Image: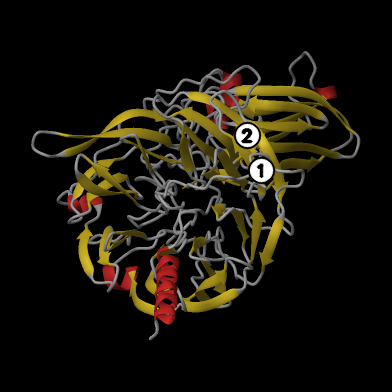
Amino acid sequence: MNRINYWVTLGLFACAALADEGRAEDWPQWRGPDRNAISPEVGLLQQWPEGGPPLVWRADGLGGGYSAPAISAGRIFGMSYRGDQEVVWARSESGGQELWAKPLGPANREGMPQGSEGPGCTPTVDGDRLYVLGARGALACLQAADGEIVWQRNLVDDFGGQPPTWRYNESPLVDGDKLVCTPGGTDALIVALDKNTGEVQWKCKALDAASGGQAAEPRPERRDQTPDRRPEGGPRPDRQSGAPSGGPPSGPTRGDGAPAAIAGTKDPSLFLSEHWGMTAFSLKVPNGKYLARLYFAETFDGITAPGQRVFSFNVEGRQFNDFDIWEKAGGPRRAYVEETPVEITDEEFRIDFTAEVENPAIKAIELIPESASNKDGSPPAEAIRINAGASERFTDSSGQVWQPDQGFEGGSLNPGFGGFAGGSPGFGPGGRGGRGGRGDFTQSNAAYASAIAIDHDGQRQYVQLTARALIGVAAADGQLLWRYDRAANRMGINCSTPLYHDGVLFAASAYGNGGAAVKLTKDAGGAVAAEEVYFSSNMQNHHGGMIVVDDCLYGASGGNEGGFLVCLDFKTGEVLWRDRKAPKGSLAFADGRLYLRSEAGELVLIEPSRQRFIERGRFQQPDRTESPAWTHPVIAGGKLYVRDQDALFCYDVKAK
């Protein structure tokens, strides 16, 4: 080989090695280079033009799914369902052309409709390999160049794993020579494998098994240390009341002979059941003038303060905005009746409900003809009385008969007993959970979050939010080091990746729960404990993720029925601001700007601020599907990547 060819060949090998290693501006795994949703890129647009940044290219034919792209060395990687197969694919970063697609196994056709379009795992790229986890538990290492499978395991078959109700959704963690993931089995809650061979390095047992079979300690009484600092007329914090409270019913019960704990009424049993999450109520009635009465009480123990359930409703043209049951009634489990005169001219009585923060919820509806609402107090002959959520007629203390639930559009029934007080998480009266115990929506010990690696006091740890608790395990041998329960909600539906910043961990979940900051301590014997710094019900992050910038914690707070962006002081948990102009969605950060993708699909550019919400641009991608926009945005190489199921959009966000 002559000298010129030698140096050319050496240069090509160097370029290939550099390509395999990726670039600083790449996004090679879930939530970016450091799993904190922060890109190191600079030189990006600080303000979007009208209509958003320019679209560079669009790629179709990805298949269904919520897998966010991983970007490394000129390639884009993702996962999808295509027909009856679950596939891993690679595309060109320059134009979106497909480079290869590799079937991983059969598509998972589970019963739950939410997210059933396809997998949610973001591939993890490590040099010339990538690692993926399928919805059914297929774990694989592939060659990045051509998709050939190097090795493959299965979390269920090989480790006794139990998939969560809505399938595995984790993105594997690669740390050194280890691949870390969460089967959720009794003997293998978390496992570490050799990333090169798939051989087991260690297994961490499930929490109860790891503690010698002892049940977990009961949850402590909630002490919400974050006051509601909402300015007058400002946006309200978000809660998700659609979750059973779990455990023995903390609210009133019906049918056991015990007094119902509803104050301010002669008929507390009328306020037990409810209909929630509805969009409207309507019944055919004769034209005429009526007095409408709407009955409310806050009976879900996940609502702990004013502003955590807020909705609007319109009663035959009269608008009630920012209606807060807690605020109106003066606290929880207190009856409140809103009444208004109405005139029916189209033979239909109608109420329209609009969710703002949380699900709308109502206990009963009464419509009294004007001619019958005289001063003599005689019962109206043709009054309509509906006991929302009830399955049978109810006779009140005055002998008036209330008909069972009817006339509602959408939403779910809540019978008001057996731990259902306040609603269930969006699956109707036939949904699982809430019948004693924790009200789990999963038998798995795994949840839906992805693990992170941290260093504390000279020890490498893997931190994961499981179905039961936030935990830390030793990277060396998988020993359970500590656990903290309050960050995990009682449904086991814990989705957000934990954060680690300035020696403090933060983890949060929705469904009536919240977020907690914990600091790790080590005693003289080397035992590690998680000490709570604060707990805030104002950060109920569902699955959009959270980001810390300049000691401010940004994240959407809200559950199935929406929510909006909240900014907390990371050190204290104090609410700095919240704004409904920034709706619930997923977050990324690059070059001094937050990128918010709302669940409706809109993208918003936000300038971080401790004082207020500052918008720097907003646009909507073309051809939005009807599926929720749950896929997180990705910033890499001066481009913004937005996936909507079968389509991937690439926008130029580089400053010119």
Report the residue that reaches farthest toward the left. Answer: 525
- Dot 1 surroundings within 10 Å: few (below 14), some, or many (20 or more)? many
Left or right relative to 55: residue 90: left
Q: Residue at x 69, y 43 (%)?
A: 48
The residue wearing badge 2 is 362
Coordinates of residue 656 in the picture (x, y in percent): 67, 47
Q: Tell me the distance, in whole angstroms, between the alpha carbons under discs 1 and 2.
A: 9 Å
Left or right: where 459 falls relative to 157:
left
**Element type at mark 2:** strand
Please state if 65 lies on the left or on the right of 651 as rendered.
left
Check the image and name the residue furthest to the top.
Answer: 375
Q: Based on the displayed image, in which of its 4 quarters is residue 637 positioned?
A: bottom right
Give the mark toward the camera: 1 or 2.
Answer: 1
Give whichever of 487, 292 is nearer the camera. Answer: 487
Query: Of residues 232 and 200, which is closer to you in this image?
Result: 200
Q: Secondary structure at mark 1?
A: loop
Q: Which disc is residue 215 wearing? A: none
Residue 358 visible to an observer of this rendering: no
Q: Earlier in the sequence, mark 1 or mark 2?
A: 1
Q: Position of residue 583 (x, y in %)?
A: 63, 39
Against 17, residue 535 (above or below) is above
Tell me which amino acid carries mark 1. Answer: Met
Q: Residue at x 43, y 26 (%)?
A: 573
Q: Amino acid at mark 2?
A: Ile
Asked if the residues shown at circle 1 and circle 2 are in contact, with their CB atoms under 8 angstroms apart, the answer is yes
Q: Determine whether 89 is above or below 327 in the image.
A: below
Other-residue count near label 2 (Cα within 10 Å), few / some / many at <14 / 14–19 / ≥20: many
Asked whether residue 545 appears in the rendered view, the answer is yes
Q: Residue furthest bottom?
A: 1
Image spot of residue 351 (x, y percent): 75, 36
Q: Which residue is mark 1?
A: 278
Which quadrant would residue 292 be assigned to in this image?
Answer: top right
